[in-house]
Image (cartoon, rainbow, N blue to C red):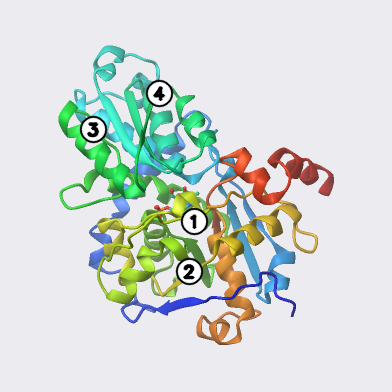
Amino acid sequence: MKPLIPHDTLHHHANPRARRGEPIGPRPRAVLTQEAMREAREEIRAWPGYRPTPLLALEGLAAAAGVGQVFYKDEAHRFSLNSFKALGGAYAVLRLLKSRLPAGVTTEALLAGEHREAVGEITVCCATDGNHGRSVAWGAQQFGARCVIYLHATVSRGREEAIARFGAEVRRVGGNYDDSVRQAARDAEANGWFVVSDTSYPGYMTVPRDVMQGYTVMVDEAIQQLDAPPTHCFIQGGVGGLAAATLAQLWEAYGADRPRVVVVEPEQAACLYASARAGAPTAVEGELETLMAGLACGEVSLLAWEVLDEGIDDFMTVSDAAAVDAMRLLADGVDGDAPLVAGESAVAGLAGLLIASQEPALRSALGLDAQSRVLLIGSEGATDEAVYRELVGRSSAEVMAEVATHA
Ligand SMILES: Cc1ncc(COP(=O)(O)O)c(C=O)c1O
């Protein structure tokens, strides 16, 4: 079989602590409860403009990878934000505002501006590499709060402008993502603002838990859309929140028969991989220079780690070149598959699947075969058009136009 993605380095760690073939245990359940997941579903499904995103069967890609089926959850269509992150930050903003307002204030009342004065006194803030900040700014704007967003040096102008369009004040900070997290925390403390972060740290757990609960809405949709349980899920990792929400929801739904879950990270920012190897949360230092901006995280979310540690079966890393190849494969459509628009942080899982499927030893270690049914989360569309065009060689609109002629 001709490799779909050439690669030179390969890092894979099989997690010896993973509990496979067992129902979900008390440790992950202490983080993400069924009740809270249900609450998030009821809330978010009632938001104006809510629609489940499509789950696409990519038959050409599955055949090329030598697996039975590949299902791609396409988050390019999530609200107007083009990423799954719309579910997390905005939901956490809403929960925070409700906790500061008199009991009984409803989402409808907030959306209608009925508590404008009280909400306008509240400032939410966060650090972001793009998508989370967009979600927080969008949530703050919808529900009427003030918002300040911190961006580190390498976040693109396009992403900055997209955040500013939702009315947030944007502040640039030197250093990497983790430095911007610390700056947001310091300013919030000094000004009486509320940090709405997607990552947890000692003493800061409530909001990131709400963020992950918001993400589970997407996984629940995928479970409803699938007609049989997947055997594998390849999921990209930044601080680990997405992977934790995905794993927890799959584990709750399928119990001991849950799929094998593989976390895939950029090789320059593989804090989950490093933590799994060390057996404890472990930071990765340095510039974290990767094209996959949403995954450029050097420190794991402690809360996410509580879910991942005994649940994720395998940890892998992929190069930036592999991610770009995966974006182009989706944009072209493999062997008759419809073209798809996926941003650079959306495809690490796909790149991991393709590399694993073409490496005999890894293929067999992961149990990939012609019967495998693989779930991928395409976590963003073209969230930065200029970056997308540069990497893929044409605009997302051009790729979408090909979708129209494909049928
Ligand atoms: C598109 C996209 N995918 C995946 C992730 C990773 O999510 P997490 O940081 O929760 O692991 C991010 C994070 O920003 C993202 O923007």
Rendering quarter of residue 26: bottom left
- From the image, tell me which residue sits under label 4: 141
Picture coordinates of residue 374, whole percent (x, y): 58, 68
Q: In terms of sequence position, does the residue under pointer 1 or pointer 3 come before the other? A: 3
Rendered-image quadrant of the N terminus: bottom right
Circle 2 sits in a helix, a strand or a loop, which is it? strand
Sequence-first disc among 4 and 1: 4
From the image, state whether disc 3 or disc 2 is nearer to you.
Answer: 2
> Which residue corresponds to mark 3?
194
- The tag on residue 290 is 1
Q: Which of the two discs, 4 and 2, labels the residue nearer the N terminus? A: 4
Earlier in the chain: of badge 3 and badge 4, it is 4
Q: CA distance from mark 3 to mark 2?
A: 34 Å
Task: Return the residue at label 2.
Answer: 317
Amino acid under disc 2: Thr
CA distance separating discs 1 and 3: 29 Å
Q: Is mark 1 within 8 Å of ligand 1?
A: no
